[in-house]
Image (cartoon, rainbow, N blue to C red):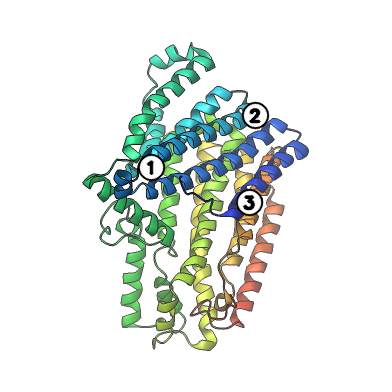
Amino acid sequence: MLAWRLQGTWGTWALLAGAVLSFCGFGIGMRDWRAGVVAAGVFLGTLVIAWWLQLLNSALRQNEPALACLVPHQRRRIVTVVGLAWLGGSLAIGIVFGIGLNHIGYAWLAAAATMMYMAVLQRLPILTLAPLAILVATRFVPLPSVWSFFTEWGETGISSVGLLMLLMLAPPLARLLFPRGGDGHMAWHRQFVDRVKAAREGLGLPGQELTLWRSSSWTDRLYFADLRRLSERTALAPRRNGRADPLLMALGGSVHPGASLLGIAAITVLAFATGGNLLDYMGRQGSVVQLCLLMLVLPLAAHVYAVTTAVQRFRAEQALLRLCPAAPATADFNRQFGSALLRRFAVLWLASTAAAVLVAAIMIPGVQAQASVGVTAALALLLAAFVVRDFASIRRLPNVTSVAAIVAVIVLTVVLSGGMTLWRTHVPWLPIGCLALAAIGLIYYRWRRMQSLPVAFPAGRLATD
């Protein structure tokens, strides 16, 4: 039998809680139960996809080359379980979204195609760029005329033909994902296991520094440039108040805002390249919400998470760097360390806000979009308070953090959706200013408190668990 156990119980409960809260929020708060079903379907669909990916990883690891050849019927059982999970998961997503959108056939077809696409990515990761290429291509290349021929079939015809085509693709895909042994199977299985371990550890694979999938080959160029500049400056004329900046470089490229800045630039270019396609698909209100989440909330939250995880990962390096002669003094270490973290967050916040304002002004002109960006930018400042903290007693992020993050995203989505009905004539500068001042006050309080705490490096040495 296929051995598989669901990982991340807290994540499951978090997604289920998000589905319930979003359904009740849209249904009770906005009297739009259909939108509540769609919002709940997003969380339930994410849960099904997470289960699907876990099952795929478990099945691919268990289909070892030796076992595939020696154990009778193991590969057949694995393929059967994965196939049934694909059909059941896609049908569940299709029913939920079909109820909210009145198109069960289209929803089932989209869910089945998405799950099959994610399965293909396990063997061919380069196809990750395929949706982006299609989205940009449709901006400049008109859809072929054969599409109008298929639209005449209606939802039933298109869904039936699409599902039949996916079923025809399933056997060759099963042979691609689950080989029957051999040298090729052995080489690919070893590479797959290494990739899973590397993703779990958050580290790059040795010997892949120059490949496209190794982040340091292109996204960390700003990090290396900044590291070189700080090293030369510190060697020539070390400054008393600027010694924490070189120490931050030892936490790796994930803490440096360079990768996030390149990501913001890529999202901006994508928004301009797709033009009005996204606006046509999601509508004005949905486009504004997605703009605020993708360009303001996601980069800043990812940066805060990267700081928290990197400061725990490189404890041995922190202990060594703490002994360097150029390290800040003990009494002044936390002040300089917190100031350096806040400066980097400020750079990322300014870049995200500027990009969001630019995209909103060009793609979604109007007061409503500008007001939503302003409110989201003011609220995003609160994330800086999580950067300055007691690093000496830091623990692993609790599981309830994921629940809080999901609830925060839901609340922000409801606030922006409801606020767009109020911000029709003017930008609410007074609420934006009050939120920004409150966030700055909280950040200043946390920064001052951090100065009286034990020295940050090495992080986690005072944790009790």
For this orientation, the residue located farthest to the left is: 183
> Based on the displayed image, in which of its 4 quarters is residue 383 positioned?
bottom right
Q: Amino acid at mark 1?
A: Gln
> Based on the displayed image, in which of its 4 quarters is residue 381 positioned?
bottom right
Quarter of the image with the C terminus is bottom right
Q: Are marks 1 and 3 in contact (CB under 8 Å)?
A: no
Q: Position of residue 83 (x, y in %)?
A: 45, 34
**On the image, numbered disc 2 is attached to which residue?**
100
Residue at 29% over, 44% down: 69
Q: Secondary structure at mark 1?
A: helix
- Rendered image: mark on residue 272: none
**On the image, numbered disc 3 is attached to which residue?**
14
Please say if 54 is above or below 329.
above
Q: Amino acid at mark 3?
A: Ala
Residue at 38% over, 32% down: 134
Q: Nearer the viewer, mark 1 or mark 2?
A: 1
Q: Nearer the viewer, mark 3 or mark 2?
A: 3
Q: Secondary structure at mark 3?
A: helix
In the image, 285 versus 109, the foreground residue is 109
Q: Is residue 366 left or right of residue 70?
A: right
Q: Is residue 72 left or right of residue 104?
A: left
- Rendered image: mark on residue 74: 1
Q: Position of residue 176 (x, y in %)?
A: 32, 37
Marks 1 and 3, Cα distance to the nearest angstrom?
A: 34 Å
Local crowd size for mark 3, using a 10 Å CA cut-off: few (<14), some (14–19), many (≥20): many
Residue at 42% over, 76% down: 247
Q: Position of residue 327 (x, y in %)?
A: 43, 84
